Amino acid sequence: MVRRICYVFGMLFWITQITSCSSFVPIQRYLAQPVECTPIVHDSSDGLLLDNSLMCSSASIPCAFPVTTRSIPNLEYPLFTVERRNIGLDNPVSFWRSGCAGLYQVSSAPAKLVVVYINGYNGRPTGWKPIYNELQGLPVTHIFFNYPTGDSLETTAMVLSSLLCSNVRQLRDKYIVLLGHSQGGFIAVRTAQILSQHSFSPAIRQIVTLVTPWDGCKLARYAKLVNPVSPKVFDDIDTDSKFIHTVKSSPLPPETAYTLIYGATAESSKTANPNDELFTTENQLATGKNIKPTSTHNVLTSHAESLRDNEVVMLIKGCVEQCLMNFKTSSYTNQR
């Protein structure tokens, strides 16, 4: 009898300890919509193209949090570590609250052409290094969007568009190019769509997406079944998700050119099911009837290697060079 009583009390103590553990207490790990952002205007003389930041609020965070614009010397920046990337996957709210999210401009004299880099799931700005290195010889301002890749893509696009809008005065005469890798392509397209709904916002002149799964990711659905607390982004990249439907049902602004780069490995390209080891080429081309790419390019590469593939690097360089020519031509025409 005494043994049974001790056993019961022991079990109760064990259960109490488990339920009191923070990992078992339900917490809000993702930003609840709507997210409201207020521009913070800075009078800066440091030569930065983007001066203004945001203070944002959400029901999932008791206090407002900053989304910043910063100048960095290079891509070896302390806030771009693997550890912080993992926080952005597992606990996006913590990432937002830390003030790590924002636009990071590599220190240089502001140029007329602005390239904004948006990495994909489980990525970070450093992944763009091969492409960034190739573009350094061009008169371009390089800006990297650092965000928690595990959060909602709609939320992320809303924050990015708000941040660009807060700097509309500096950006209104710039030629803006958004580069998006994988899910970053969705963010780029959605950002352009959101900006087009505002009368006083910067215009996105060119979008380049790389291996973006336009028909979604079937693995996201399986992951949610296996793990109920899987990243919120899986809701958005699931096949037939509300987010993908929203993006594909809205056209791009008429002034926005769209270059789509899709990939397949050399081995799979010889089969009836070409793919980049994650997504089929059919998926990567399924933009729907409302979003029409200006040009499409097929590259022999895997999803994982696409940012380091030399053909991809040269394609993007050629696209940026064409943007520079277009900008010079339009500037000359406007002056006449």
Image (cartoon, helix red, strand yellow):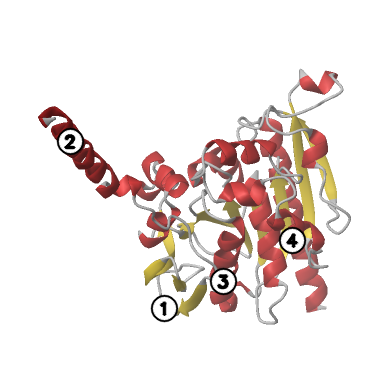
The Cα–Cα distance between marks 2 and 3, rounded to whole angstroms, is 54 Å
The Cα–Cα distance between marks 4 and 3, rounded to whole angstroms, is 19 Å
Q: In the rendered structure, which amino acid carries the disc numbered 3?
A: Ser
Location of residue 160 with respect to 270 vertically, above or below: below
Q: Is 91 in front, or is 40?
A: 91
Location of residue 284 with respect to 259 vertically, above or below: above
Which type of secondary structure does the marked residue at label 1 adopt? loop
Q: In the rendered structure, which amino acid carries the disc numbered 1?
A: His
Q: Residue at x 81, y 23 (%)?
A: 269
Foreground: disc 2 or disc 3: 2
The Cα–Cα distance between marks 2 and 1, rounded to whole angstroms, is 59 Å
Whichever of callouts 1 and 4 sits on the residue coming sooner in the sequence is: 1
Foreground: disc 2 or disc 1: 2
Q: Are marks 1 and 4 in contact (CB under 8 Å)?
A: no
Q: In the rendered structure, which amino acid carries the disc numbered 2?
A: Gly
Residue 42 image label: 1
Residue 162 image label: 3
Q: In the rendered structure, which amino acid carries the disc numbered 4?
A: Thr
**Residue 250, image x and y in percent?**
79, 64
Looking at the image, which residue sits at the far left?
2
Residue 246 image label: 4
The Cα–Cα distance between marks 1 and 3, rounded to whole angstroms, is 16 Å
Estimate how packed mark 4 is, as few (under 14), some (14 to 19) or many (20 or more) residues with alpha carbons within 10 Å. few
Q: Are marks 2 and 4 in contact (CB under 8 Å)?
A: no
Whichever of callouts 1 and 3 sits on the residue coming sooner in the sequence is: 1
Side of 298 where 80 appears, left or right: left
Residue 10 image label: 2
Q: Residue at x 52, y 70 (%)?
A: 35
**Residue 220, image x and y in percent?**
62, 40
The Cα–Cα distance between marks 2 and 4, rounded to whole angstroms, is 53 Å
